[in-house]
Amino acid sequence: MATIVEPTSDFSALPQVGGEVFTAPLQRPQHVADDWLEPRQHDYDSQDDAVWDDLFARQAELLPGRACDAFMAGLDRLDLGRGGVPDFARLSHELGQLTGWSVVPVPMLIPDHVFFWHLANRRFPAGNFIRTRATFDYIQEPDVFHDVFGHVPLLSDPVFADYMQEYGRAGWKAMRHNRLKALGALYWYTVEFGLTRENGQLRIYGAGILSGPREAVFALEGQSPNRIMLDVDRVMRTDYAIDDLQPTYFVIESFADLYHRTVERDFNAIYRELSAGFTYANAAVLESDEVLHRGTQEYHTRGGRGSNAPPA
Ligand code: HBI
Ligand code: FE
């Protein structure tokens, strides 16, 4: 049986995944190799650039006072609003000088082990396509706007940059224990949908919220969702749904706090105790939770996306 060798310090080689590890079945396009990297960045036309500019303008209007300071600073420093889809070579050069990260183009969702490997080596895989006007408000697959606007600004923050690399490294252990779903939940509730506190005020750092038009207000101000202080063990046992607003958001004190809680937690111990599925529903509130806001769950009770329920 194939096994994954967990390196103590060398994460440079693509991990080998045995057939016993549950991963999403993805069909690799013929033009990419095992690293799933596109040979070059897509050559965007003026319509594509206009989609970027319009998405950027909408978020730039919405996010001041809602996104965390580090995100706004990164957006500024990397000048992502200079016009059109950013050039990855330029972006990688600037980001490289700040935190050593680069941005590399990939065709679509890539397999977990390849994603982890890139993160562990400070490469952020970003979609090599942009949504069209028809899917302007929402697409499920991560396109270049979600990936670059949503994720890249925070990679200029040294502590967050380290957290992302540690997350990638944690993939080796999760694969060895066949607990990728649990580690995926941690990513979901931090990197994608995380909230933080700044001077006592809730702010957004999750890319899934920052790159869309609806969820910023819902996540911070809505009566419907729960807002609960992040507990790593609890979050790794919590189910998540990828196609609607979240019933629960988890809140951190700071990136340093998030970094220490994850890096200093022995994930082997979590995985040994964990069942294969999730223990808690995504709307659950537990006795042990430190609850900032107990949501009404009105939005999801009325049917969520696909119904005409307003995000309340
Ligand atoms: N691929 N392109 C891409 N983007 C992601 O965010 C991504 C992925 N593959 C796997 C993956 N994420 C998951 O492993 C994480 O969400 C945990
Ligand atoms: Fe994302």
Image (cartoon, rainbow, N blue to C red):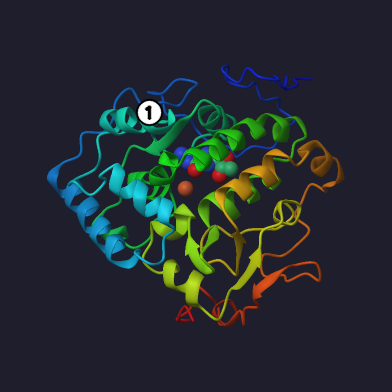
User: Which corner quadrant of the image does residue 120 belong to?
Assistant: top right
User: Which corner quadrant of the image does residue 93 belong to?
Assistant: top left
- Above or below, 80 relative to 30: below
Q: Quadrant of the N terminus?
A: top right
- Above or below, 222 relative to 213: below
Query: Could you tell me residue 262's position as x and y percent?
Result: 68, 43
Which residue ends up furthest to the front in the rendered image? 199
**Left or right position of 151 against 64:** right
Query: Could you tell me residue 114's position as x and y percent?
Result: 54, 29
**Left or right position of 44 against 77:** left
Query: Could you tell me residue 292's position as x and y percent?
Result: 64, 73
Look at the image and tell me whether residue 291 can be seen: yes
In this orientation, which residue lies closer to the viewer: 78 or 294? Answer: 78
Residue at figure coordinates x 41%, y 60% from the top left: 67
Identified by mark 1, the residue type is Gly
Badge 1 crowding class, 10 Å Cα cut-off, few under 14, some 14 to 19, many 20 or more, is: some
Q: Is mark 1 within 8 Å of ligand 1?
A: no
Look at the image and tell me whether residue 306 can be seen: no
Query: Could you tell me residue 97's position as x and y percent?
Result: 36, 28
In this orientation, which residue lies closer to the viewer: 295 or 229? Answer: 229
Which SS class for mark 1? helix
Residue at figure coordinates x 49%, y 71% from the top left: 220
User: Which corner quadrant of the image does residue 40 belong to?
Assistant: top left
Which residue ends up furthest to the left in the rendered image? 46
Write down the residue under mark 1. Answer: 96
In this orientation, which residue lies closer to the viewer: 135 or 240? Answer: 240
In this orientation, which residue lies closer to the viewer: 257 or 310? Answer: 257
- Above or below, 310 relative to 93: below
**Left or right position of 149 against 9:** left
Residue at figure coordinates x 52%, y 75% from the top left: 304
Residue at figure coordinates x 48%, y 38% from the top left: 158
